[in-house]
Image (spheres, coloured by chain):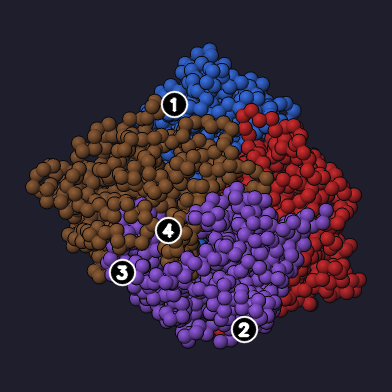
Chain colours: A red, B blue, C brown, D purple
Amino acid sequence: MAPPTPRVVVPIDVKKKPWREAPLHNRWHRTYPDSEMFFEGELLSGDGGPLDWGSLTHYLSGPVKVIDKEGIPAKPGDLLAVEICNLGPLPGDEWGYTATFDRDNGGGFLTDHFPAPTKAIWYFEGIYAYSPHIPGVRFPGLTHPGVIGTAPSHELLKIWNDREKKLVDDGHQSLKLCEVLHQRPLASLPNAKSCLLGMIKEGSSEWKKIANEAARTIPRRENGGNCDIKNLSRGSKVYLPVFVDGANLSTGDMHFSQGDGEVSLCGAIEMSGFLELKCEIIRGGMKEYLTPMGPTPLHVNPIFETGPVEPRFSEWLVFEGISVDESGHQHFLDATVAYKRAVLNAINYLSRFGYSKEQVYLLLSCCPCEGRISGIVDAPNAVATLAIPTAIFDQDVRPKSGRVPSGPRVVKRTPDVLRCTYDGDLPITMNPGGA
Amino acid sequence: MAPPTPRVVVPIDVKKKPWREAPLHNRWHRTYPDSEMFFEGELLSGDGGPLDWGSLTHYLSGPVKVIDKEGIPAKPGDLLAVEICNLGPLPGDEWGYTATFDRDNGGGFLTDHFPAPTKAIWYFEGIYAYSPHIPGVRFPGLTHPGVIGTAPSHELLKIWNDREKKLVDDGHQSLKLCEVLHQRPLASLPNAKSCLLGMIKEGSSEWKKIANEAARTIPRRENGGNCDIKNLSRGSKVYLPVFVDGANLSTGDMHFSQGDGEVSLCGAIEMSGFLELKCEIIRGGMKEYLTPMGPTPLHVNPIFETGPVEPRFSEWLVFEGISVDESGHQHFLDATVAYKRAVLNAINYLSRFGYSKEQVYLLLSCCPCEGRISGIVDAPNAVATLAIPTAIFDQDVRPKSGRVPSGPRVVKRTPDVLRCTYDGDLPITMNPGGA
Amino acid sequence: MAPPTPRVVVPIDVKKKPWREAPLHNRWHRTYPDSEMFFEGELLSGDGGPLDWGSLTHYLSGPVKVIDKEGIPAKPGDLLAVEICNLGPLPGDEWGYTATFDRDNGGGFLTDHFPAPTKAIWYFEGIYAYSPHIPGVRFPGLTHPGVIGTAPSHELLKIWNDREKKLVDDGHQSLKLCEVLHQRPLASLPNAKSCLLGMIKEGSSEWKKIANEAARTIPRRENGGNCDIKNLSRGSKVYLPVFVDGANLSTGDMHFSQGDGEVSLCGAIEMSGFLELKCEIIRGGMKEYLTPMGPTPLHVNPIFETGPVEPRFSEWLVFEGISVDESGHQHFLDATVAYKRAVLNAINYLSRFGYSKEQVYLLLSCCPCEGRISGIVDAPNAVATLAIPTAIFDQDVRPKSGRVPSGPRVVKRTPDVLRCTYDGDLPITMNPGGA
Amino acid sequence: MAPPTPRVVVPIDVKKKPWREAPLHNRWHRTYPDSEMFFEGELLSGDGGPLDWGSLTHYLSGPVKVIDKEGIPAKPGDLLAVEICNLGPLPGDEWGYTATFDRDNGGGFLTDHFPAPTKAIWYFEGIYAYSPHIPGVRFPGLTHPGVIGTAPSHELLKIWNDREKKLVDDGHQSLKLCEVLHQRPLASLPNAKSCLLGMIKEGSSEWKKIANEAARTIPRRENGGNCDIKNLSRGSKVYLPVFVDGANLSTGDMHFSQGDGEVSLCGAIEMSGFLELKCEIIRGGMKEYLTPMGPTPLHVNPIFETGPVEPRFSEWLVFEGISVDESGHQHFLDATVAYKRAVLNAINYLSRFGYSKEQVYLLLSCCPCEGRISGIVDAPNAVATLAIPTAIFDQDVRPKSGRVPSGPRVVKRTPDVLRCTYDGDLPITMNPGGA
């Protein structure tokens, strides 16, 4: 019996600009003529998920057409079981960064409190990450791809575009979230600017047609996509619905580590990485296992199984939040408001231990913290909790009698987070260590 | 050195009606003349957290005034560290129930999908619970008190009453949640009906004054209260702000087990139980450790540390939801809508394995499932996930090629969930085993 | 359907001397006329596993005859599946002790290094134990019965007595262990002295016959017995072979916590406790599942499944030992010698952090440390490891650059372990807190 | 600040025969003229730990001389803290094997029961291993280097050689282990045959001198060495004593996975791999933290801390063994005999589920099972346990009522373990998939 041999299907040269890399794309669409072919069960290796930044997000590898051993492609209505076999930073490129964007450039969950762009660089020592910009913490990464999804059918794409356009058209008056969230973009509608479609020549009529209707990759949708679920890590398996022949699987946005919610938006530790996948086609599985939650059979969501090697922590410090916003206004069972308050509580608390609030905001975006919906029925207060493993700190951060933590740390060992210019000033392929 | 001896401070006789039990109350107010005294550091044992049901929720034990070894009570601005030392069902009463309420009687998170009242009885075998009404599952309990909190000050009580009244006054037009949630009560304002105030004589002038302003116990607020956080279990420690002299700690609503969100409202496994606590006063700790998130210094939330004996599971099946509701309408980063969809996805999925949807709804309310806020920044879709430990089932519930799970189970071993009358028909102190 | 109701089958009054308690016994024998009856599947509750001490060990509750719902007892060749449903200290008696014996009174694993008797008292705070005699540590208990087993048949009893007598007769010259182990008793042969046989009248002819052939309870054997396996805790299930009609299940020797190996002999935290069991008879299961490892079909060993609520630790400090003894003598793949060295290494190491070696010896006997056979094939050195969870200490006990741990602790907060008289001076039923 | 960059210090070409690879050696000795230099704190990467087999074991990479940032080497008496940053199979070579040797060629722990050589090939799918020769199991690897150690001083080397020679000279009459263990080699004394000393020319006078006194690498000793401790995995940190200037760190024998004890001798999943390390010198730490357990200050053992990403399992089936051997002979507190019996019990048990005993023997050597010393004081029976995570099987292997597991599996899906010739017939660098 021949053993499975991982096959590099999407080689990336991170020294080149992404738009010169043939297999990259940054839009969801049902078809690309240049799909790679991939046999069910085979190990698929991509040796360089590209970095993710700015207005171009996300550069995706693929799409890969999945076929079974008889050569029959995955079909609409099938379920594609994708196992995350292995993944990690690119050898020789063991670093990443986490950042917040300017309020006028996308912002983040707490952009009203933290309107300025900042970033922190993280270095990897095997399973661990540490940052000179946020000293005194070190944690094992729960490494995962931020984006993994199948291509939408024409019908599903139309549903997406219609409902998101309606949201934008209805505008902010329909919203109840606290003021600052209102100021963030409501949705990113199709836009030919910066559209990257793999081998399809920019400016061609085919390119124009697709670029003007293909979906942006920012939000998670029915096809999976930018889920940013930190537990889609080593050994996990995600079941994706198939909407087009071959499934056309795309992936990218490699994260060394991320906290639940990825609160600062560009909040995971973004890195260049490799990814190995294995696929199985469950014939008819989409219909068998996924129940539509909407007016069409396409309103489904993926499911997944976690892997067995997630980092173990035994002690967690947990912050609660309820759905009363910072102005004291009572919201009705709003888990988003409750989570916002839990995150703010954690930031304020940890800033007593020698950190600036900007440092903690970045830290909670990328460390292995857990965001929970703890209570969702006891009107009017939803309760959300944010749990932080205490082992990531080199000091005891629990409340104690007789301790006065609120003073500055006696020795501030390293610089604070980096201040950035408006457009992010994000590192791309250079190793910033010398900066 | 004298060893610590747990002292029973709130003895309960579950055979009697709660309103004949002196120390019970079901409202938050700053003072009761009959507070028990409790020394800091001492083990406090309550031997019968009363059952919780219907319009009277919740019957609380206490309040207990906490003083230090010099006899000085906890003061406003202190932090009360309460360790959950031990807890469990009352010996001889090893059973509980989980229920949904009628849509017109409080409803639940999914009351638009499940408008009728149902219940299931659970029996305990040591750490495990099983139900004849939901066969084929058995899980260890993460036992916890649903309610634990300190008494509000006069000022804090006014803040609560004002903001919740405003919510009710503004009415449903201010809300954006899908229609059915609108039909649930927005808040439970102070109401003298069924008010229970311990030893204060019902109908007395003192009783009337308090009953008309004291807060209902349904929602979690700044004082802790009905947090329904399943991880407040054995060995955990919660840090509660102190608003009145002595802290006036109350607790109750014992849960043998609960899922994150307690989605069916009366969704935990409600039981009679005992609880042992130990307290430490952190002088000035509220100001030191909690940062107000609102217009007054009182807008704080408790924090807690988890305990080391939570049940371990290594395999989880995870359901995703995004903030598009069942009608296909796009919401903006709404974690409540996303979680609702994740829960519905899980219910639909598991109903393929021989269960009715009502059974799964009750099961997800009380089994040790985890609700996560996975993505909260990628506009417009919030992503929530619901993770279910697969080990609680006696069958393999993962998706598989070539399996046809959607047929009925060959042998339906036991009856389905029980249908109830409008007002719940909930068991109280009788052991319902013979029913 | 009637719910299962735990039934107290062995009530104990710890205020009385054990030999006045009818159901207690301290010998293994195939039959007692006063066995309790117990239905398969029923919850069996013993409300006071008696304390264990001195030359009388162990006082066992039972034996209990197990029968199925048709009234047919367990039969030889069956397998008895016993689930540990619940257990804990007796309410009101939340304390225990750990001790070493005098070298001439039984000694312990390291009696050559620690020949004098010592003890430490532990108090329980819910799931945690702490001791005034070993300050600065606190840990959750992995509570378990030290002894659980079925009665031997006549044939099996004879095998035991013959092989242990042969060991004693062959004497120390046959041994290769380092000198000091030689000085401990090789085995405890049947002995009528202090024999306790439940309701059988002491001195009667029946008593004499049994007392002179019944097996002492010290060692673990084919029937289970004094396994001292700390993982036989809440939620675990042990499969015991059945050798006599009804199985005649006995249990006792309640431990609040124990380290692997229970190195100081009376090394677990011994306590008064209660225990709830549930039984299932697997007909023919002994033959089906257990393979004899010896000349008769009786040479079998129990198997068990662990429970899901063992305390979680994420950081362990691990000490290695090889099979070279303290004199530098090389032994051949001897895991006992290797483990002895690992334990000594741990004691020496931890004594640098402000503890006496006697304190650490007691601590390693009762804290949740893990003893592993790591290497058993690479001649001539077996490798054993002892892993200690660092979270049980209130200081960081890991090696560090530039730290000088070996000095005395600045403040010695409490007294050291208690020195005892020859015969142990062990507390029995009095709460020693006032001592 | 410059980021740490892993530096390849020991490049290996697995296509070449090991003895043509300059930096490899297979003996412990205090000095080699060709040590690599390595700065404390730097990440050290070896990109091909060679395969391990037959009479030449083990091919080690290094030695590496460790110096601090001032250029001062580690000194005798220091402690070398080595963090296992990352490790894994060589890309493109994702497979390994586990094997038993012929009884006359080294044997294994159970060579009396399994005298013939066998092997199984394992393929890796990311974190998982599976084998066509042992179907129905799949498990995540706890990948680790089997060998990691520092060079011995002249004095320590002499202690080793003396005590092992004495063992061989005293011969088998000094042993008490069951007969078959007697027939295994007692120790592997220095032997110039097949000696490999890196760049030192074979046959030169220097080579001859060293080859005749350097220690074989088979057993674990004071310097660490062939510990075969499966928990020395990703994120763990081992503290090694330093005996010579520069420490002279060597490592190799890469294991994808191993069970406690590695019972079949060549029992781990042996593979080609890479390893990244980071070192810190704790000056004086050997004297500070390690206490000699023997006649000289050199009789010490390393200690280590486990890492946070070990695979999680929540259900274990545990087999017990006592120190009575297969002939029924009673041994005195012998943990080796007890563990042997526990392993045999497990093999016999699992062979009821469709496996040959040879398959289970290999499986228990390499799957993540845990071997515990559970009881070591209750004379005369030591108790050892072997715990197997049930999740590695694709069938339920727990005892059940009414099941007849002992019949053959209906479908034997793949061939059994491979039979080998006397000298192992082990694969080396060829991918055996086509075989």
Q: Tag 1's secondary structure? A: loop
Residue behind mark 2:
D430
Give me the C-alpha separation between circle 3 and circle 4: 22 Å
Which residue occupies 33% across, 61% down?
Answer: C175
Which residue occupies 22% across, 53% down?
Answer: C189
Residue behind mark 4:
C337
Residue D89 sits in quarter: bottom right
Which sits earlier in the primary sequence, circle 2 or circle 3?
3
Give me the C-alpha separation between circle 1 and circle 4: 39 Å
Amino acid at dot 3: Glu
For label 2, the crowd category at 10 Å Cα-Cα, with few meaning under 14, some 14 to 19 and many 20 or more, is few
Give me the C-alpha separation between circle 1 and circle 2: 70 Å
Chain letter of the residue carrying label 1: B
Asked if C60 appears above or below C306 in the picture, the reply is above
The answer to whether one can see residue D201 in this image is yes
The numbered disc on residue D326 is 3
**Circles 4 and 2: CB distance less than 8 Å?**
no
